[in-house]
Image (cartoon, coloured by chain):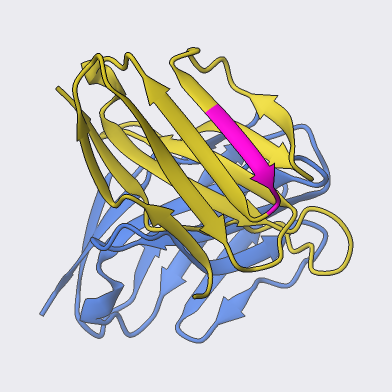
């Protein structure tokens, strides 16, 4: 069964600094998607960034980028120039190609210190 | 309205009550999902509907009964719940086949359920 592990229950960073959130996953599939979702106190899960496993290039969305290491089954999220609005729960998620199920990690609570 | 909307946002019910959660998606997607989010636990997939047919049921107790009358609407009917069923229930949708299949799910804001 596929599993997703986020080993950091909580992280904090100073505003304008850079922070990296860790995620590892376990799968026997070769084709899959990986995602980082953000859940602010308003509760709505919002997609931050998406990576397709067949792409070697790491995905980037403005201040958010990932370090995708397929062999190591690692998918970390780097947030540059942290802003107060980045404070939220961050969930790493995995979905096998063609599968219905999106498997989530336990989440990392990110606090931004002004 | 755009995106995925869920009603009610908050629900308090007794163990003998019957209530329903409603989800509506305005994205033209062909798959809809119910997830349960409890404190200190990963999100748990409950049900998946693809093209209005239930394709996944993750050993959910029968006191939770889903209904998908069309590709835009999804319900979760609740009856004789237990206090441990108190949680945030998230609805999501996705485009599972053909053009627009990016693999991601689009979520609603959730329904916070408290069972007394």
State left or right for residue A48 relative to residue A98: left
Q: Which chain is yellow?
A: B
Q: Residue furthest right?
A: B98
Q: Nearer the viewer, residue A71 or B98?
A: B98
State left or right for residue A80 relative to residue A16: right
Q: Residue furthest left?
A: A114
| Residue at the (69%, 39%) spot, across then down | B49
Q: Is residue A45 above or below residue A17?
A: above
Rendering coords of residue B75 (x, y %): 52, 40
Q: Nearer the viewer, residue A31 or B65?
A: B65
Res A72 seen here: no
Q: Which chain is blue?
A: A
| Residue at the (53%, 69%) spot, across then down | B3
| Residue at the (39%, 25%) spot, across then down | B78
* Main SS of residues in magenta: strand
Q: Quadrant of residue A111?
A: bottom left
Res A13 seen here: yes
State left or right for residue B42 relative to residue A82: right
Residues in magenta, as a range? B66-71
Rendering coords of residue A112 (x, y %): 19, 71
Q: Nearer the viewer, residue A102 or A67?
A: A102
Q: Nearer the viewer, residue B15 or A6?
A: B15
Q: Is residue B13 above or below residue B71?
A: above
Residue B70 falls within the magenta-colored stretch: yes
State left or right for residue A113 relative to residue B4: left
Rendering coords of residue B111 (x, y %): 33, 46
Q: Is residue B22 above or below residue B78?
A: below
Rendering coords of residue A67 (x, y %): 58, 64
């Amino acid at each position: 069964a596929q599993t997703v592990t986020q080993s950091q229950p909580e992280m904090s960073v100073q505003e304008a600094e850079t922070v990296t959130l860790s995620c590892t996953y376990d799968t026997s599939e070769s084709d899959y998607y990986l995602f980082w979702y953000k859940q602010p106190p308003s509760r709505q899960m919002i997609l931050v960034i998406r990576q397709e496993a067949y792409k070697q290039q790491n995905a980037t969305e403005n201040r958010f980028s990932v370090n995708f290491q397929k062999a190591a089954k690692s998918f970390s999220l780097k947030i540059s120039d942290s802003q107060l609005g980045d404070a939220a729960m961050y969930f790493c998620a995995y979905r096998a190609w063609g599968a219905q199920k999106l498997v989530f990690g336990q989440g990392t609570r990110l606090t931004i210190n002004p | 309205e755009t995106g995925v909307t869920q009603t009610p946002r908050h629900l308090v019910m007794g163990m003998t009550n019957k209530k329903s959660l409603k989800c509506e998606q305005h994205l033209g997607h062909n798959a809809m999902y119910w997830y349960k989010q409890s404190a200190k636990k990963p999100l748990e997939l409950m049900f998946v509907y693809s093209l209005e047919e239930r394709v996944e049921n993750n050993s959910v107790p029968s006191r939770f009964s889903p209904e998908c009358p069309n590709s835009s609407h999804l319900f979760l009917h609740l009856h004789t719940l237990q206090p441990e069923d108190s949680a945030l229930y998230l609805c999501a949708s996705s485009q599972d086949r053909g053009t627009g299949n990016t693999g991601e799910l689009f979520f609603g804001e959730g329904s916070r359920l408290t069972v007394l």
